[in-house]
Amino acid sequence: MCAGVHAAVDMAMRHTDAYCLHGIVHNELVIKELESRGCRFVEDIEDVPDGATVIFSAHGVAPGVRARAEEKHLEIVDATCPFVAKSHRAVRDFCVRGIPVVVIGDPEHAEVKGLLGEITDRRAPVKGERIGVVCQTTMNADEVRERVRELQRDYVVDGVVEVCNATKERQDAVRAFDGDALLVLGSRNSNNTRKLCEIAKCRVFAAGNMEEVLKLRGEISRYEKIGVTSGASTPEEFFKGAVACLKRTPRHVAFIMDGNGRWAAKRGKKRGFGHIAGAKTLMRVVRWCGERGIQYVTVYAFSTENWRRPADEVAGLMRLFAAMLKSQAASLVKEKVRLRVIGRRGDLPEKLRRGIEDLERRTAGFDRQLVVCFSYGGRAEIVDAVNRAIEIGEKVTEASFGRLLYAPDIPDPDLVVRTSGERRISNFLLWESAYAEYHFTDVLWPDFSEGDLDAALADYASRNRRIGGVK
Ligand code: FPP
């Protein structure tokens, strides 16, 4: 974020009971965050109740609006960007000196409306006359220079207030970028973000939030050299998340959640206690993976071999899964995570099957996915696929066989993490993990932390993935 935006957002965060006149900055994530904290956004000063607190957005307001706020006895929090305030002073100064002002910008933009409101004498300048030029701070700097040159043909340009430095520096960086594709982060209604898209000389992708980045990731990753930039009002957290998402972050991470029983035993508790703690870790891991731009998380929750465990443990795991489907439904929907369960579903109790189907339906439209392997075995999956191939009566290839597996549309896991110190594959994703990297940690699954996840991701990023080739 540029300094002006930063200061404006900070002010709004400190006055969340206020009415903000116009979006504090043109960024959907910032607005959503402020709205969730209680801030109300209005477009007309008349919509602010008398005596309330009003925030003037970073784009500034016309003097008439300020006067009206005073008449309505509003407490004013002025978050106008200092560079915009400087442009207002320049317009006033030209007006005092009787010099006509030309404002270069989008007449529908809040900043330009504010600047135009400062002009006391709206007459058009005559040829050869001295004029002042002020531009919207977020214009394309090259375009402004061109417009000024045009004006100089007919008028004597007395002084020019150009685009702000933060805008100019970003634009210069984009002009200088010689990569294959550029991802521009920011909202559609942000003028400076749109200008970055226009200026770029390579293929441009634009995204306003993480969901959009995730959707574009596959397409972007086909390019060799990718740049990332953002509009001046884009939150840093979103920027970092998007960069991490595009860097050597695996798209699909699978977990063998091992060690629940030992974790419980260490505390003198029954194994079921460890599974409940493990379930909580699972939901945290799903969130952390989402924050790191990992689109697919697959977990080994109950294997075809686990049916051999004591009956009370098996029943406990069935109950735990059913309870999770209920307790986690709202958070999966809120975080836009699609649930998929793979394995021999026919083995599961009817009620559990219905619960699974219901949540799968409710989350079917989301891009991020949590794949739970339940009554799952890698060999069973291959055998089931072979039987289907026989039913269809087709000789298979690797590609056509892959399409007969439980979730053929999901890309193979890039990384498989196994906790609890065991170094085995244990019949997990046998076909799909042919080229996966493995990361083993001694940490027991219930203790698996955000730091442990980052260590696994760093280990993955350090591997040289040749996939049979030479690099
Ligand atoms: C292996 O640890 C873990 C399991 C067989 C169950 C994993 C299940 C959860 C984490 C619960 C949440 C998930 C769902 C969807 C129900 P272990 O019990 O074999 O541990 P040990 O090796 O220490 O005995």
Image (cartoon, grey):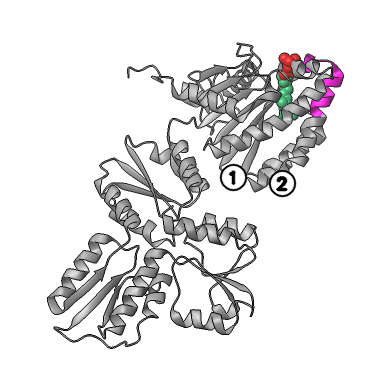
Q: Picture quarter containing residue 156?
A: bottom left
User: For the magenta stretch, what is the residue range?
Assistant: 306-318
Indicate the amino acid at tag 2: Ala
Which residue is found at the position 33% from the left and 43% from the top?
181
Q: Does the magenta run of residues contain 36?
A: no
Task: Residue lying at the far right in this picture: please name it.
Answer: 312
Q: Which residue is mark 2?
A: 330
Q: How many marks?
A: 2
* Residue 277, numbered circle: none
Q: Which residue is mark 1?
A: 366
Dot 1: what SS? loop
Q: Quadrant of the C terminus?
A: top left
Question: Residue 266 or 356: which is nearer the viewer?
Answer: 266
Question: Residue 145 or 382: which is nearer the viewer?
Answer: 145
Which residue is found at the position 72% from the left and 32% from the top?
280
Which quadrant of the render holds ligand 1?
top right
Principal SS element in the magenta part?
helix
Question: Residue 23 or 409: which is nearer the viewer?
Answer: 23
